[in-house]
């Protein structure tokens, strides 16, 4: 997992993340990461840093669509489950909701 001492800048990011930006977010140590385009990053000075959220539980936004065989979204095998590509990110079914992956 990325630690506070690692510094991996995310280049070319023009969107500003905040509580109302539309991207899922998750608390990660001493900061908030925003989940976006298949990765997670957080604000650090004048740029964003990449983070590895392996093992962090991040619940996806609520939506009416149910993912499953034939739902119209690309299915991607991910360990012991299947993720569904949806609006530029991946969701996995988890105990009555979807997780961000």
Image: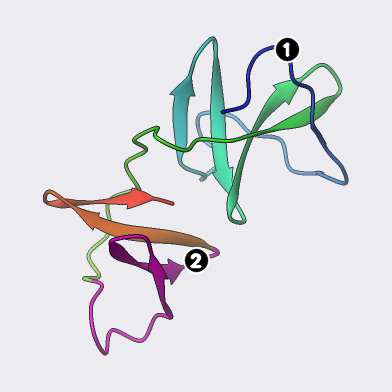
Residue 5: quarter of image: top right
The quarter of the rendered structure image containing the N terminus is top right
Query: Residue 93: image x %, image y %?
Result: 23, 58
Q: Is residue 65 above or below residue 13?
A: below
Q: Residue at x 24, y 85 (%)?
A: 69
SS at circle 1? loop
For the residue pair 71 and 28, the one nearer the viewer reads as 28
Q: Residue at x 54, y 9 (%)?
A: 30
| In this picture, residue 49 sits left or right of residue 65 | right
Q: Are marks 2 and 1 in contact (CB under 8 Å)?
A: no
Per the image, the residue denoted by label 2 is: 87
- In the orientation shown, which residue stands out farthest toward the left? 96
Query: Residue 40: image x %, image y %?
Result: 59, 40
| In this picture, residue 41 sits left or right of residue 65 | right
Q: Which mark is residue 5?
A: 1
Residue 59: quarter of image: top left
Q: Which residues are magenta?
A: 67-88
Give the CA separation, mark 2 to mark 1: 32 Å
Mark nearest the camera among 2 and 1 is 1
Query: Residue 86: image x %, image y %?
Result: 44, 68
Q: Is residue 35 above or below residue 41?
A: below
């Amino acid at each position: 997992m990325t630690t506070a001492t690692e510094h991996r800048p995310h280049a070319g990011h023009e969107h500003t993340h905040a509580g109302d930006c539309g991207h899922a977010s998750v608390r990660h140590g001493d900061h908030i990461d925003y989940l976006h385009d298949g990765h997670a990053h957080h604000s650090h000075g004048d740029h964003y840093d990449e983070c590895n959220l392996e093992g962090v539980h991040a619940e996806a936004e609520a939506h009416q669509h149910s993912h499953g065989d034939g739902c119209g979204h690309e299915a991607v095998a991910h360990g012991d489950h299947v993720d569904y590509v949806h609006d530029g990110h991946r969701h996995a079914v988890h105990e009555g909701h979807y997780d961000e992956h």
